[in-house]
Each structure stands twice: as structure tokens, then as C-alpha cells.
Amino acid sequence: MKKLLVTMIVFVLTMGVQGQDDGMDALMSAMIAAKIHQDSIDTSNLVVVYDYECHTLDADGKAVTDRMKLCLQVGQHCTRSYPYRKFLEDTDGYEYMTGENYLVWKAESYCFMPEVWTNYPDGKMTVRDVILPNHYEAREQRKSIDWTLREDSSTIGGYLCHTATCELHGREWTVSYAEDIPSSAGPWKLGGLPGLILDAQSNDGIHHFTLNGLQRLASPIYYEHNAITQKVSEQQLIKNRKKIFGNKQYPKHPMYYIPDRGNLNADKTFGEFGGEFYVIVNGMLEPKDAHVFQPLELK
């Protein structure tokens, strides 16, 4: 089944800086630009919510912890790991026009979290990410993770968990998985164990996924289509992230790599929420400031 959604446009309803007529024109432009076709590729039997934390530095070198909620939909054939906010947007009755939603969206911009579909298409992994103004997608053959199972155990969310370690994209990870939940899934690109991953930490202490909640829930797992997504290899996407976000200019001037933004070939919408001005570029919030990039993938 296909679903046509208008996403990432709700905040423009608060615009007042350009006048009512200009605001309505901008709103209509954003609605047209943000239309996304979504194919329902599977149905979840389990929806898991994780709290994600990233320990980093702000633009002044002060230690900060960035946080967001991540949703993992586990279906019969594939999984999707993506912001919990977007999962709520796909469900009926979610209140878009709230200050909380704007703050959630803004907080997500610090976290550099891609969307990941595992086993879609069959035997492959699809990763979607944004480096403004571009949307990128990488699709590669799914690779097995070389896990080391340990004897340690713990209890998370009432589930008995066992411990495993691995190296993935240059980082060492320690995870806790629950064999009582018969799924090999996990957040982001982590998975492949004899039970659902409920907790995962990079061994350097920078990245941490921990269980917030789970429920047996049938919900469509969507794969999004839009006209502006560029297809690249996984290695090229990792390289692009490190080159742009890893530049020392990024925390203070996150759009440094686009010096002439006035001539930017993109759909842009300007607005204001709670006294704070913002810009939406190709359906994504443009960051005014940022934090030091801590890549999930070092290589």
C-alpha cells in the first residue's frame, strides 16, 4: 500500500515575520516540497523505544550530553530504526503543533542519527541520512557482525539479559540482549544476536542506547521515496559525514560548507516559534549551532 504524507512542515504555521500572505505562500511551498511517498514494506510485531545519549562537547568546548528517542520497528521480514518522533508522526492523533515537538526536532539535529532498514531489500541494509541540503541513501549487502558472547548477565526492563561484545565500523561495543524476546534486532546497525538488544554502549563511553519501553504492536513499516535522495555507497556516506560534520568549523558554523546560502538550490521555508527563528531546508531543520561530531562509524 502507498501513503502520501506531508512531513516536517507543521512549524511554519507559526510564521509571522513575513506577513500573512508571504507566510501562506511559504507554507504551501513547504507542503509541496515535503511530500514523500511511503511504501508499506512490512508490519511490525514489536515496537521498541530506546533512549540514545551521546557525550560530546559544545562549540565552546564544554561537555554536553545530546539525547533523543529512537524507535525500532521489528517486522516479520525487516526492521526500521529511526527517530521516535517520526514514528509518532505516522500514527493518527499525534499533536504536531506543540513546543515540545519543536524542541524534540531541534535536539535530534545534534545527534546525527541515520535511519536504517535491515533486510530491505532482502539480504541488504539501507541507510538514509541528511547532510543539508542533500538527502543520501546507501544500500549495501548485509554483513554479519562477529559477536563474542560472554557469561555476564543483568536484568533490564524485567528481562534477563546476557552480554556480548563486537567491533563495528571501528568502534568496540558491549551490549545486553534478552533471549526471552525472540528477535535478533537492535538499535541502529546493531543486531544478529539470539535475542533482542536492550542496551548497547560504545566502550569509549560516548554512545549509549538503553531500553525505554517495548510493546507488541502491529504498525506499518514504511520505506520513504522522495525525488531529492542521492544514492551513494556506505563508505562514501561515512566519508561525507566525517568530512562535513568533523570539520572544526562545524560546531560554531554548521552551514560553513555552503557560504552562499542565498543561492542555495533547495526548497526553503522561514518561520518563527516561541520567539526563535528557524529555516527548513528540503524538509529538514537547518541547525544554527551544533556540537562536536562523534561519529557512530569511525571507518
Image (tube, rainbow, N blue to C red):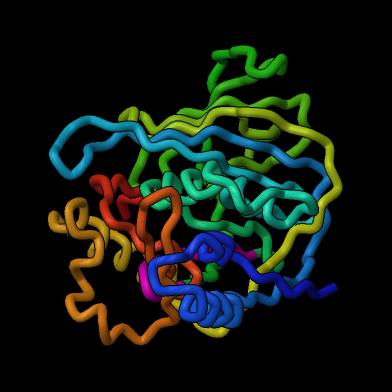
**Above or below, comparing residue 59 to residue 115 in the picture:** above
- At 55% from the left and 14% from the top, the residue drawn is 152
Assign the magenta stretch its main secondary structure: strand
Query: Which quarter of the rendering shows the C terminus?
Result: bottom left
Q: Residue at x 80, y 60 (%)?
A: 42
Front position in the image: 117 or 226: 226
Magenta region includes residue 177: no
Residue drawn at (68%, 55%) of the image: 89
Quadrant of residue 211 within the rendered picture:
top right
Q: Position of residue 30 (x, y in %)?
A: 53, 76
Which picture quadrant has residue 193? top right
Residue 150 position in % (x across, y down): 53, 21
* Highlighted magenta segment, given as a residue range: 124-135
Front position in the image: 128 or 2? 2
Q: In the picture provided, is 169 more to the left or to the right than 142?
A: left
Residue 128 falls within the magenta-colored stretch: yes
Residue 172 in the image, given as x and y percentages of width and height:
38, 36
Q: Residue at x 13, y 40 (%)?
A: 60
- Compared with 224, 169 (above or below) is above
Observer-nearest of 9 and 283: 9
Question: In the rendered image, is residue 173 in sight?
Answer: no
